[in-house]
Image (spheres, rainbow, N blue to C red):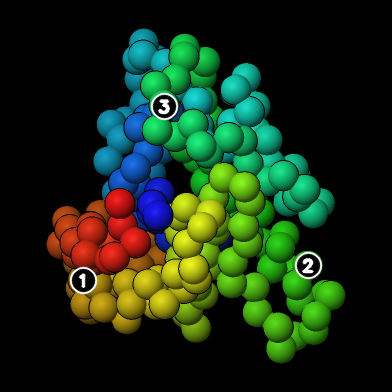
Amino acid sequence: MTIYSLYIYDRHCDCVYYQDWHRTQPLRPPSAANFKSGVHRLPPPTTNGPAARDSIFSNGSGESSIPPSGAPPSRVNGDLAKVGATGGSQKGLPFDEEAKLVYGVVLSLRNMVKKLSGKDEVFTSYRTPHYKLHLYETLTGYRFVLLSDPSSDSLRFVLRQLYTGPFVDFVVRNPLVEMDSRTTGIDNDQFRGAVDRHMRSLSMFA
């Protein structure tokens, strides 16, 4: 089993943290207007930089294979199985667009579950032939999203451990971290290192 990537969204629906482990196709930097420092380790976008390869949510032509957030997705992503392959020269999605697509899918399925099953039912995960998405929501409005191998069991407990452990210790209790910033992400090396160590210590990490 494999863990691919982690997204954290704040109560403003903005992605404030991203980290990946088994993604060999690099992310494409967002545009300068949408670049938010601290979210990831990508350098600021340049106009003459090399083109990145396909995004995990790209269909190979640079276009998203995720339907609009208002429609139930039948096949939500592109071929995530190609994450480990060396891609061609096609352009992938910029990071900000990919993060919006991930959040849009989560929001659509979450609202669908509430409408079909009632308020007591909670959306926690879904599976495709190529990956499984896990969701953990906090009472303060933060959403932790993890992409893993489709054969994995529920990893919601892992996201809860990240929230109650490293997130509370190095983000919530850190006076130097601005929690509700609309311009910067969670730029904290201690938190990033703690997340990495926690993920690598899991038995399903490969």
Q: Position of residue 99 (x, y in %)?
A: 52, 46
Secondary element under disc 3, as helix, strand or loop, is loop
What is the CA distance from the residue labelled 3 to the residue labelled 1? 35 Å
Foreground mark, 3 or 2? Answer: 3
The quadrant of the picture occupied by the N terminus is bottom left
Q: Is residue 73 above or below residue 163?
A: above
Camera-nearest residue between 44 and 98: 98
Q: Residues within 10 Å of mark 3 (few under 14, many from 20)?
A: few
In the picture of the structure, the residue carrying the numbered disc 1 is: 170
* First along the sequence among labels 3 and 2: 3
Q: Residues within 10 Å of mark 2 (few under 14, many from 20)?
A: some
Foreground mark, 2 or 1? Answer: 2
- Residue under the image location 46 percent in, 55 percent down: 148
Q: Is residue 89 above or below residue 86?
A: above
Which residue is situated farthest in the right direction here? 116
The reply to whether callout 2 and callout 1 are in contact (CB within 8 Å) is: no
- Relative to 15, 100 lies left or right: right
- Amino acid identity at mark 3: Ala
Q: Which quadrant holds residue 46?
A: top left
- Amino acid identity at mark 2: Met
- Relative to 205, 124 lies left or right: right
Secondary element under disc 1, as helix, strand or loop, is helix
In the picture of the structure, the residue carrying the numbered disc 2 is: 112
- Amino acid identity at mark 1: Phe
Q: Residues within 10 Å of mark 1 (few under 14, many from 20)?
A: some
